[in-house]
Amino acid sequence: MAQDYGDRRLDPPDGVLVSQAQAGDREAVQTLLERYQRRLLAVIVGMVRNPEDAKEILQETFVRTFRSLEGFKGESSFYTWIYRIAMNLAIDHQRRGGKRPLVEFDETIGVKEDAVGEGSAILGVDPFKSVRSRELGRKIFEAIESLTPDHRAVILLREIDGLSYEEISEVLDCSLGTVMSRLHYARKKLQTRLQEML
Amino acid sequence: MTCAEFEASFDQYVDDTLDASMADACSCHIAKCRPCDREVTRWQQTRILLSTAVADLATAVDVSSVRNDVFAALGLDQREDAASIERRRSAIREAAYQRDGDSRRSGGRRAQREAASMRRSGFGGFVRFASAATVSAVTAAAAVMMLTAGPTTTAGPREIASNSSNSSIKRVDFVPPWSRKAFDDSVAVDYTPPPLARPNVSDVHGLEAAPGQLVSTWVQPRTNARVIWVEDRGLGAPIRMAGLGK
């Protein structure tokens, strides 16, 4: 898929892939999906916490995005567009109260299920550190959940994905001033909630 | 700068979006003001905790099925669409042109060496050089089938009758298949193959190629052997069945 764009060998920009996808190019659809799935997932999982819900929202985001791709005129960038779809779905999900119980934060997830306990020392996982880390993770997510979905969205887009204020305002369809005030409030609240840990 | 002024600029300061003069003023302030400095440090710690916690949870999500689920929901099946096939073909064509260019730049010596080797080693040489020449362009699985084989009577460039009346003689230089431009860029040559030495013609009764594989066929001028060339473009689908029938 890589071609020469300018003087460097780069992946095609979103605009090129979107045009190809609009023309029915399956490979372009796949490239866009692979490009955005991890980035979107991090923000979505921060919003909903439950991995299964996050995965469902991610899939729904892609389905809606590609189904309505023909109507995409390029007035905004593709990534702010797809982020908008993802965040709207995640915020709606949160307002509905979610579907599944929230998972406990577990730093050993994805490492090895039996790594905790007797075998943990052998596998290099310190059980005390693990418990502390799990506790830390739980408190962080509790702090995130203490924010409203709108505030949560702003802080995650800024801190996890590094979007600029302008991009956040485009994604969330609100003014720059609103973004800044929500960001300020969210930061203060997070710091207050996590005060004992810092 | 006062603490209140710093507080007003706090977010932009930690986000590094202040202009240079304001950023300098904030830096000077926190160098002198411990509470404000502590605020900045605390936020940096919070930021690390936040991103680590979210990243850890995101890593635990198995996204391996997302692509297939999304494609299924969109009604996109596993077959390659026309645009993808054309793009793959273009890439192969481009690689073939590149090889031609390399060969010309080296004074044609490489082509000559290949042709000489072909003459020396017959079909074995063909396979060897085909692998070497195509390895950069294709991740190869090649099925080459000799359908009709005649004894080698002449080697290298040869003169053949352009038609049955022998009114004109056309010289056809041997061009190894990997040096040809592309599979569909064949040059029309008025060519009548010599009579077959063996009349028992074999035929392929079935060849089933999978998506992502390109099948091309040509006749080798020297041996009058028909070659079926199957290229696997790396999509992982094997050749399912290729058979020879008498």
Image (tube, coloured by chain):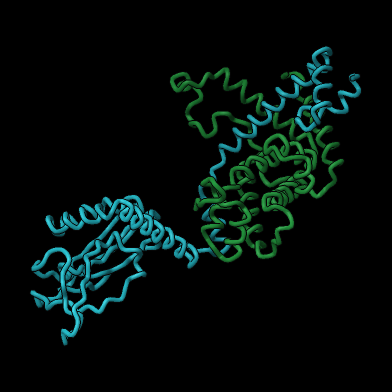
Chain colours: A green, B cyan
Where residue B48 sits, quadrant-wise, is: top right
Whether B216 is drawn above or below B133: the answer is below
Is B73 or B123 nearer to us in this picture? B123
Looking at the picture, how far across and down is residue A2, in whole percent? 50, 50
Q: Quadrant of the C terminus of chain B?
A: bottom left
Looking at the picture, how far across and down is residue B153, in whole percent? 8, 68
Q: Residue at x 41, y 63 (%)?
A: B89
Whether A70 is drawn above or below B111: the answer is below
Q: Quadrant of the N terminus of chain B?
A: top right
Q: Residue at x 49, y 53 (%)?
A: A1
Looking at the picture, how far across and down is residue A20, in whole percent? 57, 61
Q: Residue at x 91, y 22 (%)?
A: B4
Whether A102 is drawn above or below B135: the answer is above
Is B180 or A65 nearer to us in this picture? B180
Name the residue furthest bottom.
B165
Left or right, residue A57 beside residue B136? right
Looking at the picture, how far across and down is residue A119, in whole percent? 45, 22
Left or right, residue A137 beside residue B159? right
Where residue B203 sits, quadrant-wise, is: bottom left
